[in-house]
């Protein structure tokens, strides 16, 4: 007589990762642009509400003429940009107004708090689209392309909202269940 057959199954639960953003996402109503020479680093101060890893900064930009190289930075905050926490890959900005993505590899791990998202380019003029009111802080820093460093000297500040935002993945809390054991009893007579 057959009594009992025991089968053990290992059931994996999928991990679902959601991307979120912080900064100012283009809403279609931006009517002001700031044309900038290559000796400036344009920075906007934004708040990250939870711990996370930033994979890219997106910025609404356009070159005045031709293709222009640009990079993005993430700075810590001390009332002004303080320490570089991440530098993106170089991106070519074209004359077509659009959102350009600056990726970070590996991603930049941040804790909840205030950060400065910054874009710098090597061309004569790039338009940085913004809203001229209702912003937090933006800073302009006189510095040559590719030479950005820690604790830069801010040359001017304004209350704009640059169309810059960061995409991040929230730091996951330890999951309550990452797998489950399934036991199936077959009573075979």
Image (spheres, grey):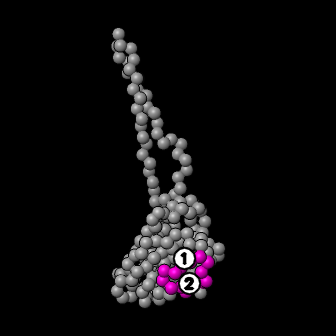
Q: Which mark is residue 44?
A: 1
Q: Is residue 155 magenta?
A: no
Q: Which mark is residue 36?
A: none
Q: Is residue 144 magenta?
A: yes
User: How many tags in the picture?
Assistant: 2
**Magenta segment boundaries in residue numbering:** 142-154
* C-alpha separation, residue under disc 1 versus residue under disc 2: 11 Å
For label 2, the crowd category at 10 Å Cα-Cα, with few meaning under 14, some 14 to 19 and many 20 or more, is many
- Is 146 situated above or below 185? below
SS at circle 1? strand
Q: Nearer the viewer, residue 14 or 25?
A: 14
Residue 179 x/y as whole percent: 46, 39
Q: Quadrant of the C terminus?
A: top left
Tell me if residue 90 can be seen.
Answer: yes
For label 1, the crowd category at 10 Å Cα-Cα, with few meaning under 14, some 14 to 19 and many 20 or more, is many
Tell me if residue 164 can be seen.
Answer: no
Displayed quadrant of residue 93: bottom left
Q: Nearer the viewer, residue 86 or 5?
A: 86
Residue drawn at (51%, 76%) of the image: 118
SS at circle 2? strand
Residue drawn at (43%, 42%) of the image: 13
- Is 8 situated above or below 60? above
Q: Which mark is residue 141?
A: 2
**32 displayed left or right of 189:** right
Residue 43 x/y as whole percent: 54, 78
Q: Quadrant of the N terminus?
A: top left
Residue 38 x/y as whole percent: 47, 87
Residue drawn at (56%, 78%) of the image: 149
């Amino acid at each position: 007589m057959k009594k009992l057959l025991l089968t053990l199954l290992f059931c994996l639960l999928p991990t679902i990762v959601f991307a979120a953003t912080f900064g100012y996402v283009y809403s279609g109503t931006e009517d002001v642009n700031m044309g900038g020479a290559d000796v400036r680093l344009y920075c906007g101060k934004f708040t990250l509400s939870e711990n996370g890893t930033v994979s890219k900064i997106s910025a609404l930009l356009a070159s005045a003429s031709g293709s222009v190289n640009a990079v993005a930075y993430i700075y810590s905050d001390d009332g002004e940009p303080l320490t570089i926490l991440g530098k993106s890959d170089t991106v070519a900005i074209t004359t077509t107004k659009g959102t350009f993505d600056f990726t970070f590899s590996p991603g930049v791990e941040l804790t909840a708090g205030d950060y400065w998202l910054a874009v710098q380019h090597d061309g004569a003029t790039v338009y940085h689209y913004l809203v001229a009111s209702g912003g937090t802080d933006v800073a302009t820093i006189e510095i040559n392309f590719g030479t950005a460093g820690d604790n830069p000297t801010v040359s001017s500040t304004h209350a704009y909202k640059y169309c810059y935002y960061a995409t991040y993945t929230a730091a996951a809390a330890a999951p309550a269940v990452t797998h489950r054991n399934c036991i199936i009893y077959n009573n075979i007579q």
